[in-house]
Image: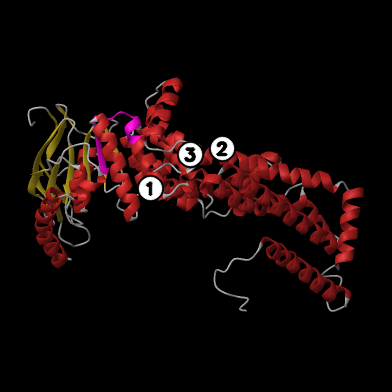
Amino acid sequence: MRTDAILRIEQVSRIFPAVSGRQPVRALEPTDLTIARNDFITILGPSGCGKSTLLRIVAGLDTPTSGRVVLDNRAVTGPGPDRGMVFQSYTLFPWLNVADNIAFGLRERGVSETIIHETVAEYVAKVGLRGFENHLPKQLSGGMQQRTAIARALANNPEILLLDEPFGALDNQTRGLMQELLLGIWERERKTVIFVTHDIEEAIFMASRVIVMTARPGRIKADIAVDLPHPRHYTVKTSPEFSTLKARLTEEIRAEAVLAAEAH
Amino acid sequence: MALLRPLEPVSQRTRILLGVAFFVIFFAAWAAATLGGYVSKTFLADPITMVKDGWILLTKFGFAHDIGMTVWRVLGGFVLAAVIGVPIGILMGAYKPIEAFLEPFVSFARYLPASAFVPLLILWAGIGETQKLLVIFIGSFFQIILMVAVSVSNTRRDLVEAAYTLGSTSIGVVRRVLIPATAPDIAETLRLVLGWAWTYVIVAELIGSSSGIGHMIIESQALMATGQIIFGIIVIGVIGLVSDLLFKFVNRQFFAWRLA
């Protein structure tokens, strides 16, 4: 599995420089991580553990203090369309309707309008937004906005899809449905995915591998394979295997959450 | 029932009624003060004299031509300032080195009173139309640059980041994120600055001018024709109000995505 690596994170650390007399913040200790092609990885950790920082470094939106990220044997120097990203905040362009949002990346790359039209229709269908193509973001619910954001990232056909707590602001029921939707798309297309979350169930349900991070300064504490069979149905969340994993990860996270709570 | 509750909205009908009510009260108070003989006619004409004077101005003295001249000067100077100022403002907001280079000077220049430039501009450009346009231009240009730059600077960072992860180049971000995202704010800036441009034009016309509303006002002062002066001021107010409503209407049509 490790032989066909798509992404290598090599000794990546991030220290935020001191602001107005305070100490510099060590957000991320030097971290190594290799991600296999077509794998679905979740990075699990308490708030402020540097997991989002790590993801932003992979996206090229933040620069590591040391180390480097290598995607397909090319070092990452900045953001690019090969690493699609879905953010926690709603980042649809509010002046564009659903179809034009999904087409954004394709238009930036100068793809022909015929192909854009087909691709948009394909991804609108995949995320279940038929009939909403002409809606503006403000007319959509949070779940629909995030579905559009996922379609927008996927339509660009990135090498790897990065998601930063994309369902964090959604209610529990919508969140569950979104997990199934995203997992369904992954099971069909096997795109490489890195998904950051602080929700243990979410981390197990979707991933084939869960990376647990410690409280700040963040580093990798555990790397746990999830061998639940695919396709996964939501009922897997009540299976004994799932419960065992959940119990184990809860222990791992709890210790860190306690540390994080004391630090604040 | 409490009539005044903080932030409680009012219906469209009530809003219009209340708005009109103020005008009615204003004119009533004015009429009472002048027609009732509390204020001397030499200093303040009554509303009826004002309307009569206005009618004479329009029918006998070609005041419509003056109004036309003033409107053309405002629009000319304002459009010139917008056409040059908006792009500079966008560049300044988008690119921090350009901001660092221009911002201190523009901040200084925008406090230079446009009216104080009138004597200088007469020396430079004479008393023709160029001078009038330049006064409006100086008054609007630096304001537009600075306000547009601030709007562009305040574009949501996460939208810019999203665009980068979708493959936008830095020029692509300016053209397809910064500009559309701030277009409603830029339009709002232009609406405000157009209002200010109206005050500069009158100042420009008070000195060394042979036409325009301001010119009429200064001539009327020599004749102690307060009715005409007030009519001129009211005409400016009405044109300002109409252009403001038009601007608001157009903004609402163009930027429906911004409205809640």
Q: Which chain is mark 3 on?
A: A
Query: Residue at position x 56%, y 49% from top?
Result: B188
Q: Is residue A87 left or right of residue A260?
A: right
Q: Which residues are magenta?
A: A152-163
In-image side of A25 versus B97 (left or right): left
**What is the tally of numbered marks visible in this picture?**
3
**In percent of the image, x 60 and y 75: which residue is there?**
B4
Chain identifier of the residue bearing label 1 in the image: A
Q: Is residue A160 magenta?
A: yes
SS of the residue under disc 2: helix
Q: Is residue B47 above or below residue B260?
A: below
Amino acid type assigned to the residue bearing label 1 in the image: Gly
Residue B198 lies left or right of residue B143; in this view the side is: right
Q: Residues within 10 Å of mark 2 (few under 14, many from 20)?
A: few
Quadrant of res B254: top right
Q: Is residue B176 inside the magenta stretch?
A: no
Q: Which class describes the residues within 10 Å of circle 1: few (<14), some (14-19), or many (20+)?
A: some
Q: Check the picture and name the quadrant holding the N terminus of chain A.
A: top left
**Residue tagged 1:** A143
Find residue B83 and name its label: 2
The quarter holding residue A194 reads top left
Residue underneath mark 3:
A132
